[in-house]
């Protein structure tokens, strides 16, 4: 298959979706395959990984499903081993895994803090650490980590915002270390896209989210997935340590009404 990722071998973590519909990971996995990559769809729920891999194969792409909890080092190592043994190497790691916590400081339990930091931040460290030797062997590679605009704005949601800000710090730190090895490391900070992760929000919150950004349209997993394709491809060969904000311009805005109050 020809395409922007032709001949590349990719891992997408959290490649399934927690509910019916399209998550960011599922969309990225599908787009990677459409652009010519062979994709290892990794999810801790095997059926979710299988669903995404099946969708890719059904449209003529190449994909395998693999079950792993990416908060565990041994499972990250096994995930990379699978890609290398099956396809001969690894070029792209898309660290998409993430869970949300909507609790503020005083409501966040220690257990929830540890869980969110573990899934949203530690997983990026463990998966990247496992992937780097295989990428070095290939002479380079690309790592993309999914952050959030919650890292960039004062939203509350303390554990989530902290973990997602940590992702940006991780990317900058690691980009400097891995640049000389030909490995680029970047982040994507999505705005409020409509994925199964936020399905419980309800129609009012959904409409509010849509209206809040200058483009006033709803984002989907495809919008985030196209950003991942770009950062994983040679088109971004001179881009590393950056955070690509995909949010319909939401982070450009001031809180509703605040400008009026100063006039
Ligand atoms: N939806 C939004 O508005 C929004 C906004 C900003 C950022 N994001 C980020 O997008 C990313 C994921 O979005 P999605 O739509 O694909 O979510 P999703 O919940 O639909 O899918 C995530 C998948 O990750 C898997 N998973 C969870 N923990 C795992 C673990 N420890 N090991 C392996 N797999 C695990 C789940 O089983 C699930 O299938 C997250 O990092 C999220 O924080 C989403």
Image (cartoon, helix red, strand yellow):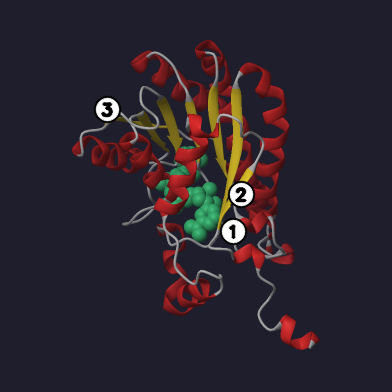
| Residue 86, image x, y percentages | 34, 16
| Residue 129, image x, y percentages | 60, 24
Q: Is disc 1 in contact with disc 2, using a CB cutoff of under 8 Å?
A: yes
Instruction: Say whether disc 3 or disc 2 marks the residue closer to the N-terminus.
Output: 3
Quarter where residue 61 is shown: top left
**Crowd class of label 1 (few under 14; some 14 to 19; many from 20; radius 10 Å):** some
Q: Look at mark 2 in the image and give the residue it sits on.
A: 116
Q: In the image, is 118 to the left or to the right of 59?
A: right
Q: CA distance from mark 3 to mark 1?
A: 40 Å
Q: Secondary structure at mark 1?
A: loop
Q: In the image, is 182 to the left or to the right of 219?
A: right
Q: In the image, what residue occupies the spot 69% across and 65% down? A: 156
Q: Look at mark 3 in the image and give the residue it sits on.
A: 1
Q: Quarter holding the C terminus? A: bottom right
Q: Look at mark 1 in the image and give the residue it sits on.
A: 101
Q: Quarter holding the N terminus? A: top left
Report if residue 30 is visible in the image. yes
Q: Secondary structure at mark 3?
A: loop
Does mark 1 have its CB less than 8 Å from ligand 1? no
Instruction: Say whether disc 3 or disc 1 marks the residue closer to the N-terminus.
Output: 3
Q: Which mark is residue 153?
A: none
**Crowd class of label 3 (few under 14; some 14 to 19; many from 20; radius 10 Å):** some
Q: Secondary structure at mark 2?
A: helix
Q: CA distance from mark 1 to mark 2?
A: 7 Å
Q: In the image, what residue occupies the spot 65% across and 51% down? A: 111
Report if residue 103 is visible in the image. no
Instruction: Say whether disc 1 or disc 2 marks the residue closer to the N-terminus.
Output: 1
Q: Is residue 45 above or below residue 127?
A: below
Front of the two marks 3 and 1: 3
Does mark 3 have its CB less than 8 Å from ligand 1? no
| Residue 22, image x, y percentages | 35, 53
């Amino acid at each position: 298959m020809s395409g922007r990722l032709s001949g590349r071998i990719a891992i997408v973590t959290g490649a399934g979706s927690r509910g019916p519909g399209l998550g960011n990971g599922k969309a990225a996995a599908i787009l990677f395959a459409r652009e010519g990559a062979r994709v290892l769809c990794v999810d801790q729920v095997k059926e979710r990984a299988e669903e995404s891999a099946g969708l890719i194969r059904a449209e003529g792409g190449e994909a395998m499903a693999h079950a792993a909890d990416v908060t565990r080092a041994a499972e990250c190592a096994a995930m990379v081993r699978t890609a290398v043994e099956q396809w001969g190497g690894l070029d792209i790691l898309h660290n998409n895994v993430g869970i949300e916590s909507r609790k503020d400081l005083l409501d966040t339990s220690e257990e929830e803090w540890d869980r969110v930091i573990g899934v949203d931040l530690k997983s990026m460290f463990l998966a990247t650490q496992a992937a780097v030797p295989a990428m070095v062997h290939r002479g380079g590679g690309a790592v993309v980590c999914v952050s959030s605009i919650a890292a960039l704005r004062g939203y509350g949601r303390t554990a989530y915002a902290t973990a997602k800000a940590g992702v940006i710090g991780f990317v900058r730190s690691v980009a400097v270390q891995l640049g000389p090895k030909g490995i680029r490391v970047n982040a994507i900070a999505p705005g409020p896209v409509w994925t199964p992760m936020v399905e419980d929000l309800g129609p009012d919150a959904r409409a509010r989210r849509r209206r809040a950004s200058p483009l006033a349209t709803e984002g989907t997993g495809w919008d985030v997935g196209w950003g991942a394709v770009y950062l994983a491809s040679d088109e971004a060969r001179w881009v590393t340590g950056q955070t690509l904000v995909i949010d319909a311009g939401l982070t450009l805005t001031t809180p509703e009404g605040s400008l009026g109050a100063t006039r």
